[in-house]
Image (tube, grey):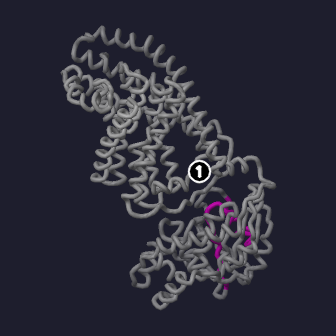
């Protein structure tokens, strides 16, 4: 049952005008409702607390509250309830958050397109001033075609004016082309509001009238977004006077002239923390002293009392590729400190509100590879875990963008554990090698992304993202995220590492490993100019890329060979868990194409690098 039957909840006098409050979640709508009706309603910052319909009879009006929604549609229960109440409204009071005009005006314009008389309550104007933003309220009213009343609901400012202005509500401006379609459809449905929802493909409203939903949702949404963006450009401007330092810093982070140096500074801090302090000082202690001098002799001695190290089982447990030696030492001694350090830094950036600002800054640049700024979020999360980042691509605006982003995540975004190992390998060679590695990986991402942008037809969608206030990260939040993500890494990686060690051990003991190394010698020695033993690292890379990268530690190679091997293994196939998620998010055929393409590209770019540098 998708139709919300108001008669079960509201006893409205026959001649009362239905005045409906509508707004996004957390815009202060319930406070306005309380002021208009004098009734108690739960006021909370949790979305959805007004799911039950609240109403009050005030003179000739029935004032009706609705759940907070981002649009009038049928995607969830809140929207279905709000949709049916709005369709029955005589007047709508649309409460919007002045700080988030770009988000909230989309709903405003949709209500205007429904042909319902509207008053806009422009709420939270005090927050706007703190953030150094000026809004031309009169011009906003002219462009929308409806009254706009400035309010600060929590201080009761502007609420009396809303009460006195209800009769001034009027129908706003509608795009002529949309109006033409609406007029044509009005012959089949009862109201302009229902006509709009049928045009936007609402199957439930169309079903009420026995007609098929129309296929114009994407077109109407796009035109509405363009109109809202145009309005905001005219009515809103940033000013320095009155803005707090956090607001100014937040703007500097978005402006490329100041944002890029800030981003480089942030990356340098991460390099000093992960690649220098943790990768060298901390890992030297955990891997060298704790695992190398204490754990390894202990476990070899303990297991050796029961099983000879020279036996087949003994070699699998405590040999060169032993499950109880190599796996445990790599996981706990080498990778865990690096993963903890990386997730700590990433969690701090998430909690501070910095990531959305990076997204806004790089929006235009990402258009060259067929994406918008929102894609920077899965990319940055991919530096933590590619599996999680692949799921996060659902926030992108189109399937085309998801395919491009998932391909690039699989190819050119190393995960936290892999970054940690690479940091140890490259960081010890000096900052120039680190910069060279980053420049090469970035260039490959741009090259492949540009090609994918040409191969997949279409264009990138427009960026629509909330920019939260900039704040100092909460230590408890950062530590909680760091521990949770690191624990997830241990649970996912440890079994795979153990399986990889077991396979390598069997290959080594049966002589197959040496045969594979000989068979791949033209590729490793001839094309990549690495020792033939590098084949072992790539075999390990099929289990996890960080496992393969860790295998490079056993090679005796020059700094330039280290750079080539690091780039090649960074581009290698994603881990098994990521591969399974790619199949789930796309399909088996596309996942197979990505998997094979990534192997070819890894050896292609690695070989080209070797031919140029050596």
Q: Nearer the viewer, residue 172 or 193?
A: 172
Categorize mark 1 by other alpha carbons within 10 Å: few (<14), some (14-19), many (20+): many
Give percent across and percent down for residue 152.
Answer: 77, 64
Q: Quadrant of the N terminus?
A: bottom left
- Residue lying farthest to the bottom in this orientation: 187
Give percent across and percent down for residue 45.
Answer: 65, 56
Q: How many marks?
A: 1
Q: Residue at x 73, y 83 (%)?
A: 168
Q: Nearer the viewer, residue 205 or 376?
A: 376
Q: Nearer the viewer, residue 591 or 316?
A: 591
The part of the image, by quadrant, that contains residue 24 is bottom right
Look at the image and give the residue range highlighted in magenta: 16-43
The stretch drawn in magenta includes residue 300: no
Q: In screen coordinates, is 195 left or right of 599?
A: right
Residue underneath mark 1: 356
Q: In screen coordinates, is 212 left or right of 99?
A: left
Give percent across and percent down for residue 466.
Answer: 60, 56
Q: Quadrant of the C terminus?
A: top left
Q: Is residue 558 above or below residue 231?
A: above
The stretch drawn in magenta includes residue 35: yes
Residue 45 appears anywhere in the view: yes
Q: Is residue 226 above or below residue 563?
A: below
Q: Is residue 354 above or below residue 218?
A: above
Q: Residue at x 41, y 57 (%)?
A: 453
Give percent across and percent down for residue 9.
Answer: 58, 74
Q: Secondary structure at mark 1?
A: helix
Q: Residue at x 68, y 41 (%)?
A: 472
Residue 53 appears anywhere in the view: no
Q: In screen coordinates, is 119 left or right of 182?
A: right
């Amino acid at each position: 049952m998708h139709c919300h039957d108001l008669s079960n909840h509201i006893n409205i006098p026959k001649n009362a005008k239905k005045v409906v409050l509508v707004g996004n979640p957390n815009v202060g709508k319930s406070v306005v409702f309380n002021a208009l009706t004098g009734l108690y309603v739960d006021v909370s910052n949790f979305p959805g607390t007004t799911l039950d319909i609240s109403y009050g009879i005030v003179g000739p009006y029935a004032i009706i509250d609705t759940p907070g929604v981002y649009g009038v549609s049928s995607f969830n229960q809140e929207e279905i309830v709000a949709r049916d109440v709005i369709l029955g409204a005589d007047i709508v009071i649309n409460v919007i958050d002045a700080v988030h005009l770009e988000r909230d005006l989309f709903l405003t314009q949709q209500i205007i397109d429904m042909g319902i008389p509207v008053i806009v309550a422009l709420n939270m104007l005090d927050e706007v001033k703190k953030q150094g933003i000026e809004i031309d309220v009169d011009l906003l009213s002219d462009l929308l075609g409806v009254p706009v009343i400035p309010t600060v609901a929590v201080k009761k400012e502007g609420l009396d004016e809303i009460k006195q202005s209800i009769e001034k509500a009027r129908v706003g401006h509608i795009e002529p082309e949309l109006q033409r379609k609406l007029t044509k459809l009005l012959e089949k449905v009862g109201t302009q509001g229902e006509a709009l929802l049928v045009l936007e493909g609402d199957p439930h409203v169309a079903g009420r009238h026995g007609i098929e939903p129309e296929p114009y949702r994407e077109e109407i949404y796009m035109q509405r977004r363009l109109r809202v963006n145009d309005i905001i450009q005219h009515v809103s401007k940033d000013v320095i006077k009155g803005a707090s330092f956090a607001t100014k810093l937040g703007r500097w982070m978005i402006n490329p002239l100041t944002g890029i140096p800030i981003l480089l500074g942030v990356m340098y801090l991460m390099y000093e923390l992960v690649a220098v302090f943790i990768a060298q000082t901390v890992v030297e202690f955990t891997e060298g002293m704790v695992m190398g001098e204490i754990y390894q002799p202990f476990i070899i001695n303990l297991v050796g009392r029961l099983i000879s190290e020279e036996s087949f089982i003994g070699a699998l447990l405590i040999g060169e590729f032993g499950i109880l030696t190599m796996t445990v030492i790599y996981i706990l001694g080498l990778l865990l400190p690096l993963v903890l350090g990386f997730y700590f830094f990433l969690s701090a950036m998430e909690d501070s509100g910095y990531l959305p600002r990076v997204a806004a800054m790089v929006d235009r640049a990402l258009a060259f590879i067929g994406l918008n700024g929102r894609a920077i979020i899965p990319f940055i999360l991919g530096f933590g875990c590619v599996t999680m980042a692949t799921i996060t691509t659902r926030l992108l605006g189109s399937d085309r963008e998801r395919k491009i982003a998932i391909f690039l995540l699989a190819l050119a975004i190393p995960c936290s554990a892999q970054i940690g190992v690479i940091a140890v390998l490259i960081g010890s060679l000096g900052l120039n090698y680190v910069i060279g590695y980053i420049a090469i990986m970035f260039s490959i991402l741009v090259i492949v992304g540009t090609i994918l942008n040409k191969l997949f037809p279409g264009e990138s969608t427009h960026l629509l993202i909330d920019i939260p206030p900039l704040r100092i990260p909460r230590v408890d939040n950062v530590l909680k995220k760091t521990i949770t993500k690191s624990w997830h890494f241990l649970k996912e990686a440890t079994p795979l590492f153990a399986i990889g060690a077991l396979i390598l051990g069997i290959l080594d003991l049966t002589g197959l490993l040496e045969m594979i190394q000989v068979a791949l010698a033209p590729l490793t020695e001839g094309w990549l100019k690495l020792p033939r033993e590098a084949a072992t690292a790539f075999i390990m890379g099929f289990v996890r890329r960080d496992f393969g990268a860790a295998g490079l530690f056993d090679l005796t190679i020059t700094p330039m060979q280290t750079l080539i091997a690091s780039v090649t293994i960074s581009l290698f196939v994603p881990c098994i868990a990521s591969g399974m998620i790619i199949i789930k998010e796309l399909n088996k055929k596309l996942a197979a194409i990505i998997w094979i393409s990534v192997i070819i590209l890894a050896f292609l770019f690695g070989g080209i690098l070797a031919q140029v540098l050596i």
